[in-house]
Amino acid sequence: MYNLNWSRDELQNRQKLGTFGEYYAKMTLASYGMSIYTSEVDDHGIDFVAETKSGFLKFQVKTIRNSTGYVFMRKEVFDVSDKTLYLLLIRLTDGEHPEMYVIPAYAWNDKSKTALVYHGYEGKKSDSEYGVNVSKKNLPQLDCYKIENCIEKLVK
């Protein structure tokens, strides 16, 4: 059994937490038969690429602790028109196995999902961002993106 104490001191560093999330995401998708490809440098907002039966998917991974929080992706590297781009959000709660959400980038075009937000700043393209408000109120909106609810569509 691996550690389920996500708030311990050794994981307080954001880089270590992010690295754990990326490895966990890769292992999870590999367990469904996807081939995983990584690059040495993450400078384009894509943490890894996974090959499915129907082609390649790109993933940006974000990891948060506890039940609430906010994560964001810079607009300049997160193209919401890209049908092959996904946010893989990992929620860590002490004593529980990680929860994973696989959110397609195009989901931000659905204005009915108040958990998925866009913050645009006039004249500052690099500061504009797409985000996820992870709160108790918004969690039901994210249920359809839980990996167990959408993995079959992804691996096809």
Image: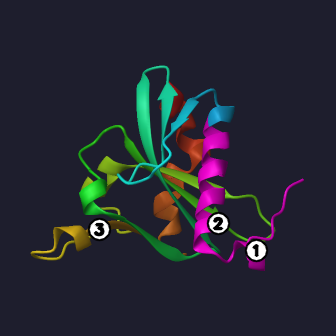
Mark 1 and mark 2 residues within 8 Å of each other at the beta carbon:
yes
What is the three-letter code of the residue carrying label 3? Answer: Glu
Asked if the magenta segment contains residue 17, the reply would be yes
- At mark 1, the secondary structure is helix
The residue most toward the front is 40
Q: Which residue is mark 2?
A: 16
Q: Residue at x 30, y 62 (%)?
A: 112
What is the three-letter code of the residue carrying label 2? Answer: Lys
Q: Is residue 98 left or right of residue 121?
A: right
Query: Marks 1/2: CA distance?
Result: 8 Å
Using the image as rendered, state which of residue 67 and residue 29 is in the foreground: 29
Q: Earlier in the sequence, mark 2 or mark 3?
A: 2
Q: Position of residue 122 (x, y in %)?
A: 11, 76
Q: Residue at x 76, y 74 (%)?
A: 10
Res. 58 visible in picture: yes
Asked if the magenta segment contains residue 74, the reply would be no
